[in-house]
Amino acid sequence: MEAMEDDSLDLKDDHNHNYCASSSSSSSSEVRTYQSSQLSDVTTVPQSACPPVPGGEPGTRGEKPWSGTTGSKFMDSDSSSESSEVSETECTAPPAAVEGKFSLDSTSKFLLNAMAVEDYRKNHWPNLEKAIDRLLIQNPTDHISVSYAQIYSYVYKCVCQQHSELLYNDLTLKITNHLQQVSTHLQASPPEDFIENFNVALTQYTASLQCIVPVFMYLNKFYIESKLNRDLREDLMKLFADHVAEIHVNTLMPLLLEAHSMPFQVQPSTMASVVKGLHSLRPDWALLAPALFSGFIPQINPPAVESLLPDYAAHDQKLQLELSMNGFPRSVFSRSIGLGHSLTV
């Protein structure tokens, strides 16, 4: 019996410890199986543990839901799985809660927009209006103190706060009111001073636009050009044409023709400025007095015709005679005059 017990002991625990090794291997396998089961339990995150993704918020549909250090399957999922998760969240949400959320957002946006408009009316536009007033009434030779950087900053803020349309309407209304006052002032001018006063008004206005248009660059770029397909300077010049020039063109044109027939009754620089200004505002106005406009703007008249050369010569002779009667020496008549051909008296 003792021998048999020893043999059984030898079988269970031989010199190579086969039994112990086999039992050790078995226990290690059991440990690894247990650890893997525990690890799988840890890494498997139930769907309810994922934070809900608000489907109505802008900018969150394309983002991957955050699941912390675990739940890597959500971070590695594709866009289709994300969209399904979002739709599930939206579908499982109570209808009353969803409706309440949207109504709260719309109310908040309305209040924020109202506050922004109120801030525009109280702070931004009054400061811009004062600066525009100073720029509109300045003379070309005056040097007034205006902070262009501050105006530029106000315009930039208005555009960024989605007040472009409001700002454009206020700007055009402000300038329209100013031009109506200019028109009233011109209407009271005596005939002998009308051409000069019109030239002052036009020159002063164009000089003001050289300051106004640049500081409203953001409004011009991001609203007028992109949405209205127009240009700020062209719009403001059209205001002058509509509210000043068009009202007085029937008075101005006869005075210009009379001054043109009597050289130096009006300064040549003033005549050139007014005629070129009218042509830039409305090119069609050149048809009212082609001879007047052709004296200051090239290519107004049709091309020369060989059969009309005698008429061109007679016109040049008349012009040279008028110049000689006003004290110009005959030596200047040897150069090209009028339509491009030279004659001498």
Image: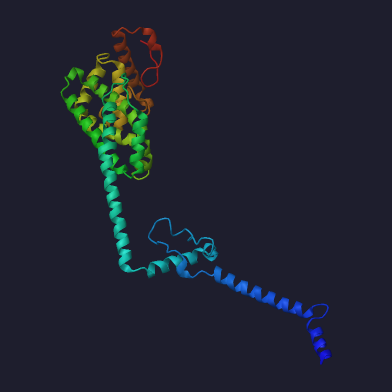
Q: Residue at x 72, y 79 (%)?
A: 23
User: Which residue is more in the foreground, 293 or 313?
Assistant: 293
Is residue 178 something one can see in this rendering? yes
Q: Left of 33 or right of it: where is 247?
A: left
Q: Residue at x 22, y 19 (%)?
A: 258
Q: Residue furthest front?
A: 2
Decide: is 315 above or below 241.
above
Q: Residue at x 34, y 37 (%)?
A: 155
Q: Left of 62 or right of it: where is 327?
A: left
Decide: is 141 above or below 124.
above
User: Which residue is more in the foreground, 300 or 205?
Assistant: 205
Look at the image and name its color scheme: rainbow
Q: Could you say which quadrant of the image residue 239 lies in?
A: top left
> Percent from the top left, x then y, of residue 163?
31, 43
Decide: is 309 above or below 11.
above
Is residue 229 something one can see in this rendering? no
Q: Could you say which quadrant of the image residue 201 lies in?
A: top left
User: Which residue is more in the foreground, 213 or 126?
Assistant: 126
Q: Could you say which quadrant of the image residue 311 lies in?
A: top left
> Percent from the top left, x then y, of residue 267?
28, 15
> Percent from the top left, x then y, of residue 320?
33, 13
State the quadrant of the C terminus: top left
State the quadrant of the N terminus: bottom right
